[in-house]
Image (cartoon, grey):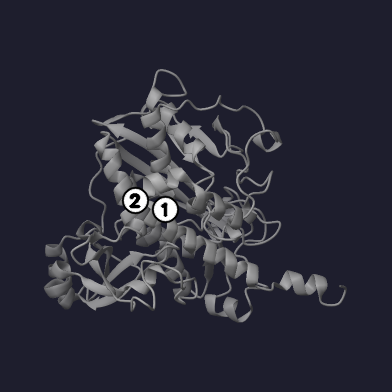
Amino acid sequence: MSQQSTPKPRGLLSLETLAQQVQAGVIDTVVAAFPDHYGRLLGKRFDAEYFLQEVSDHGTHGCDYLLTTDMEMNPVPGYRFASWELGYGDFHLVPDLSTLRQASWLEKSALVLCDLEREHQGLVTVAPRSLLKEQVRRSAELGYQVLAASELEYYLFTTSFREAQAQGYRGLAPAGWYIEDYHLLQGSRVEEYTGAVRRHLKHSGIPVENSKGEWGLGQHEINVRYAEVLEMADRHVLYKQCMKEIADQMGLSVTFMAKFANGQAGSSSHLHLSLWREGQSAFAGTGAEGSEVFGWFLAGWIAHAEEFMPFYAPTVNSYKRYEDGSWAPTRLAWSLDNRTAGFRVVGRGQSLRIECRIPGADCNPYLAFTAALASGLDGIRRKLEPPPAFRGDIYAAQHLPRVPYTLGEACERFAQSPFVREVLGSEVQEHYAHFFHSEWQAYIRAVSDWERQRYFERI
């Protein structure tokens, strides 16, 4: 990862260009979207002419319950932000016009991401995009620009989403039938889908680097070009949305679960991050291990990883990915180009960067990057020294601290952390602690197929 001047990605639109395309009949719909706590895109579809006349300047409204729901869109009680008692009012969706782009996978459509605001109160502090923008602001106060990338893995099935749901997500047909890591023959069999994704992303303002097979049956990865950290988080949620919608159009299905099935590799979202100042990497040093700033940032990121685990691993399923010998990290240590480490340092000189391998494909990138920056910047402020680089098989290093075993354990550490309270504020900490705890409680109350198969007759 090195900073170079790159042309504006193809597919990004100015309001003037959008107006021209609307006039020519090329675009007739604009999707206004924002990420929720799960990282899903929610929003509205507007007639393009109405968007230009009203929404581009004045925004639109959405119900504030959307930041208090569970996965099924049920409003969850217990939030201070919004509740039945408060009447579930509105927040304001303010288009970030720098994100306006053609959504080429949707017919005659453009898309813009929005920030959430309360009238006369500024940004909604608990909104994921607001959290990351605050950490970007704090980075800038210290004189740093943040460059980032996220690698997103997924499983592809020839079963459609509708059929998968009807089958209870059992007996799905994977798109591949043997391990296909870097395997070009298997990759060519799904190129109709993967190629379509690459082309649509490119034409929608999201430059693509490559696609490749991964270790699981039907598992693949698409990597998009790195960018400033907020833009990278935007790219992440957009290319995830694009992939789901193209799969749906083709009668396929794709999952970003961290651990889809026993015995199969988990799906990760490795985060790459570096700090820059005046066009030069602040991480670059004379040796392979980088500058003092690099060491301080790395030390802070590692030191606070346990407290911020729900921001990297937000679901019950996330923690089933952390198995020794599975390519997923289980220990909080760093190493030079070692894929068994939670923190893998790669590149040299201007390309030196930290790859955090802890997040799964189910992470919300805004929250994951928020945690990374808050932790790393604390390391810089306090000039923390990282532990020595580990060499060897970290899975075998039982003395090293381990990532939490469950979402419940991670929730408790997050909720009780003075550091999380300091960097996010008590309101945000309480809000997200309740969100993750509600997810954990829903799991605790559920009766699973595993329990019925194990206990129905034989207990």
The image quarter containing residue 121 is: bottom left
Work out whether residue 364 can be spotted: yes
Judging depth in this view, the residue of 343 and 203 nearest the camera is: 343
In the picture as drawn, the residue positioned furthest to the right comes out as: 458
Q: Tell me if mark 1 has few (under 14), some (14-19) or many (20+) residues whose alpha carbon lies within 10 angstroms of its own.
A: many
For this view, does 227 lie left or right of residue 390?
left
Amino acid type at circle 2 is: Leu
What's the amino acid at mark 1? Leu
Dot 1 and dot 2 residues touching (CB under 8 Å): yes
Above or below 73: residue 297: above
* Circle nearer the N terminus (1, 2): 2
From the viewer's perspective, is 35 left or right of 259? left
Closer to the camera in the image, 240 or 195: 240
- Residue under numbered circle 1: 367
Residue under numbered circle 2: 132
Quarter occupied by the C terminus: bottom right
- Residue 169 image offset from top left, x and y in percent: 62, 73
Q: Position of residue 333 (x, y in %)?
A: 57, 34
**Helix, strand or loop status at disc 2:** helix
Quadrant of the frame with the N terminus: top left
**Could you tell me which secondary element the residue under label 1 belongs to?**
helix
